[in-house]
Structure formats: structure tokens, C-alpha cells
Image (cartoon, grey):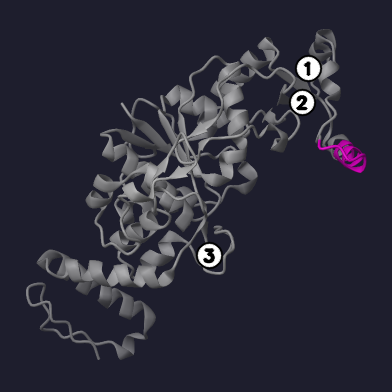
């Protein structure tokens, strides 16, 4: 069975880029009659924002993206918070240590910083001098028993044999190991994993078949594939989604701009219009995933302003039709789609009643009560609100 996951960090409100990632996971899972998991990647306690998980769940519920397993929806793949899976990561870290694909590093933060500065001054691209790689086994055991703080690093001197990296969106990828830090950290001194270790362990343990995530993780793909090979695990298929940009061309971020999904809910936008807008951002021409050739003549991608419901998006979704370029979100297209989704829904009496209630609540929240009077004759059947 096709099984995907959406794995946000609880470091703030869900933003539009995160919602599009969740949407694409939903579309792919439903198109192939699979399921998807909401997994909370909360291993960085320093960046945790109280209420963030509740906000993520509320945003997904508002848009109608119902995950199959996750917080509040128990299933066979739990627990769904990474902070509750720490023993699992440590078990896999020990496997890597025992096979020689990882080693303990006892360097202090100050020493690591000075080492990076020294290497940079010499013009080296290395970020660490591998000093602890050469410690004897006896020395490592002695220092661990003495209670010295350490981290676990991947040993990139022992890269395993594996197939070339291939992506469902970008096709066959060139080797990008040179862009990775030297011997990346897998387990921190507080025994919490980094994203690199936690994500591959969880994806394997949960039986994830396809990973759809943002393009920003594309440089890390070689490391993740190396970890799978080092542990003799079969990796899932990867698809990296081109980044969404703000109208000014800057990268979308939950810390910059008014891009929170719940803000769109509070301002009264139609959830189906928002999903329609995000789905078509970058859904353009078809590509042959094994070649860098665009199949212009065979493109079946919808127009960027095609009015589509969620079931219609599921039916037509095609990863091979995603563009390779980053995409600017055009607010005018959202306005256009919102009007058309509203016109569709006003034909339904039940939806009309809901709209009338939402409009009344929006007016009440934006204007002082003394300026608002709703006719006492208003009933759900008449749907004729009078606002003065």
C-alpha cells in the first residue's frame, strides 16, 4: 500500500508552503488509494512553540485534509511525536557505531567553532577535521564511562555502495556530497537525533513508501540515501517539491510575511479555493523523470486558474507535471478562484447558510457591535441577512 507522511516541526503556525506539502501528500495518497500520516518532528525543544501542534491540526481540519494516522488518530505506526521515539533513534545510532559508519565526537562547541574557523582560513571546504575519528576504541569507552559529553557523527570516509540518487520530480541527480558538512551529526549531546537520523529511521519503521517534501531538503538526499545503505535498509521513493515564493520573490517562511494558513481562515477565504490555488502553483508541464526533457506536447496539466474541487485535484494530480522552477504565489489568482468557488457553493442551500453565518461573524469581528444589527426576522430558511 502507498503510505506517505507529512512531518512538520511545531515551531510556529502552519504556513502556505507547509500546507501545499500536506496537500500534495494527500493528493498522491488518495490518487493511489493509499494513506498518509501526520508526524510531529519535535526533537528540537529550543524551537518548540506552545500551541503549534494544535494550530497545525486546526489548519488541516479547516482545509479538509484528513490524515489517516497521527495525533488524535491512533494507528499501527505510532507514536506520532518524535520526542516519544528516542530509544528507537539511539538503537539505530548504535548500529551505525558498531558497523563503523558512525563515531563518537567529544569536541566541545568552542573547539568545533575554532576548528571551522581554522579550516576556513586555509581555504578548505571541510567543516570538521575528523579529530575524534582517530580515537582508539579503548579511549572512546573510557571517555563515555567517565561521563564525557559526546555527539555521534556519520563517517563519510566509509560511504556505502548504492544506486545514484533519483527524484520523482527532478529525475536523476548529480552527486552532491561536496555540499554536505563534513561527517554530519546524527545524534546530539542531549541524545536527541538530528533530522537526518530521525527522518530515515521513522520513514523505515513506519513503512513509508513515498516521501514528498520541500526542495530545501534536496541537498540532504545523498546523506539520507547513504544512511539507508549503511543500515541495509530500502529507501522510499523521494519527490522534492519546488519552493513557493512571496510576491516579492523572497522565500516563504513562517517567520516572514502574512502566510499563516489560519490567517486565511480568519479573513474568510474559502478553504477549497486556497487548496486550488496552492495545488496549481507549479503544476505546469510534464517531464520524463529519467531525462531532462520537457514533454510539451503531452502535457495534461490544468491551467493555473482552473477551478477544481479537492476530488478533482486528486483525480488529475500528476507528480511528473510539476515544474522544476520555484513559483511565486499570485494573490490575484486566489481572488479569482475564491469568487468561483463561492459561486459554486451558493447553489447549495446548506452551504449558503454556512456562508451567511461566516459573513455575519466576520462583520461582527471587524466592526463595533453598535454598528451591527441583524434583522430579527432572519431564519436559516430565508437566508436574507440585513446588516446596517
Whether residues under marks 3 and 1 lie with C-beta atoms below 8 angstroms apart, the answer is no
Quarter of the image for residue 163 reads top right
Chief secondary structure of the magenta portion: helix
Identify whether 335 is placed above or below 31.
below
Which of the labelled discs sits on residue 246, or is there none?
3
Q: Residue at x 70, y 38 (%)?
A: 179
Q: Who is closer to the viewer here, 140 or 25?
A: 25
Query: From mark 3 to mark 1, how far is it between C-alphas?
Result: 48 Å
x then y, percent, for residue 208: 42, 28
Mark earlier in primary sequence (3, 1): 1
Q: Is residue 14 visible?
A: no
**Judging from the image, what secondary structure is the residue with disc 2 in?**
loop
Identify whether 184 is placed above or below 315.
above
Query: From mark 2 to mark 3, how far is it between C-alphas?
Result: 41 Å
Query: From mark 1 to mark 2, how far is it between C-alphas?
Result: 8 Å
Q: Who is closer to the viewer here, 286 or 29?
A: 286
Q: In the rendered image, which residue does mark 1 sit on?
A: 144
Mark earlier in primary sequence (1, 2): 1
The residue segment tinted magenta is 114-125
Task: Locate the N terminus and report the quarter of the image it occupies.
Answer: top left
**Judging from the image, what secondary structure is the residue with disc 3 in?**
loop
Q: Who is closer to the viewer here, 170 or 296?
A: 296
x then y, percent, for residue 173: 56, 35
Which of the labelled discs sits on residue 323, or is there none?
none
Left or right: 146 in relation to 186: right
Residue furthest left in the image: 381
x then y, percent, for residue 365: 36, 77
Q: Nearer the viewer, mark 2 or mark 3?
A: 3
Q: Is residue 144 visible?
A: yes
**Judging from the image, what secondary structure is the residue with disc 1 in?**
helix
Q: In the rendered image, which residue does mark 2 sit on?
A: 150
Amino acid at each position: 500500500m502507498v503510505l506517505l507522511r507529512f512531518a512538520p516541526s511545531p515551531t510556529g503556525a502552519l504556513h502556505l508552503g507547509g500546507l501545499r506539502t500536506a496537500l500534495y501528500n494527500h493528493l498522491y495518497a488518495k490518487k493511489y488509494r493509499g494513506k498518509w500520516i501526520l508526524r510531529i518532528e519535535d526533537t528540537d525543544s529550543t524551537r518548540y512553540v506552545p500551541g503549534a501542534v494544535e494550530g497545525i491540526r486546526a489548519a488541516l481540519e479547516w482545509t479538509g485534509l484528513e490524515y489517516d494516522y497521527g495525533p488524535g488518530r491512533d494507528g499501527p505506526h505510532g507514536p506520532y511525536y518524535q520526542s516519544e521515539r528516542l530509544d528507537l533513534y539511539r538503537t539505530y545510532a548504535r548500529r551505525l557505531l558498531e558497523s563503523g559508519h558512525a563515531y563518537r565526537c567529544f569536541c566541545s562547541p568552542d573547539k568545533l567553532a575554532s576548528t571551522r574557523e581554522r579550516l576556513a582560513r586555509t581555504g578548505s571546504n571541510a567543516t570538521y577535521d575528523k579529530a575524534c575519528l582517530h580515537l582508539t576504541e579503548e579511549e572512546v569507552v573510557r571517555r563515555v564511562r567517565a561521563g564525557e559529553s559526546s555527539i555521534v557523527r556519520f563517517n563519510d570516509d566509509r560511504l556505502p555502495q548504492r544506486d545514484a540518487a533519483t527524484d520523482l520530480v527532478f529525475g536523476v541527480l548529480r552527486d552532491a556530497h561536496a555540499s554536505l558538512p563534513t561527517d554530519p551529526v546524527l545524534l546530539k549531546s542531549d541524545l536527541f537525533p538530528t533530522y537526518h537520523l530521525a527522518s530515515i529511521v521513522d520513514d523505515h519503521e513506519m513503512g513509508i513508501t513515498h516521501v514528498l517534501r520541500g526542495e530545501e531538503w534536496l541537498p540532504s538526499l545523498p546523506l539520507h540515501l547513504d544512511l539507508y545503505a549503511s543500515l541495509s535498509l530500502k529507501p522510499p521513493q523521494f519527490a522534492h517539491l519546488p519552493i513557493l515564493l512571496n510576491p516579492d520573490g523572497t522565500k516563504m517562511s513562517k517567520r516572514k510575511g502574512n502566510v499563516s494558513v489560519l490567517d486565511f481562515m480568519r479573513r474568510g477565504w474559502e478553504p477549497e479555493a486556497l487548496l486550488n490555488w496552492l495545488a496549481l502553483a507549479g503544476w505546469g508541464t510534464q517531464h520524463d523523470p529519467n531525462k531532462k526533457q520537457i514533454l510539451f506536447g503531452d502535457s495534461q496539466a490544468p491551467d493555473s486558474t482552473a477551478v477544481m474541487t479537492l476530488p478533482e485535484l486528486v483525480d488529475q494530480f500528476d507528480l511528473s507535471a510539476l515544474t522544476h522552477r520555484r513559483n511565486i504565489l499570485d494573490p490575484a489568482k486566489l481572488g479569482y478562484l475564491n469568487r468561483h468557488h463561492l459561486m459554486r457553493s451558493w447553489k447549495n442551500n446548506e452551504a449558503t447558510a454556512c456562508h451567511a453565518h461566516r459573513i455575519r461573524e466576520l462583520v461582527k469581528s471587524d466592526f463595533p457591535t453598535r454598528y451591527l444589527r441583524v434583522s430579527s426576522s432572519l431564519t436559516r430558511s430565508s437566508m436574507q441577512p440585513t446588516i446596517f
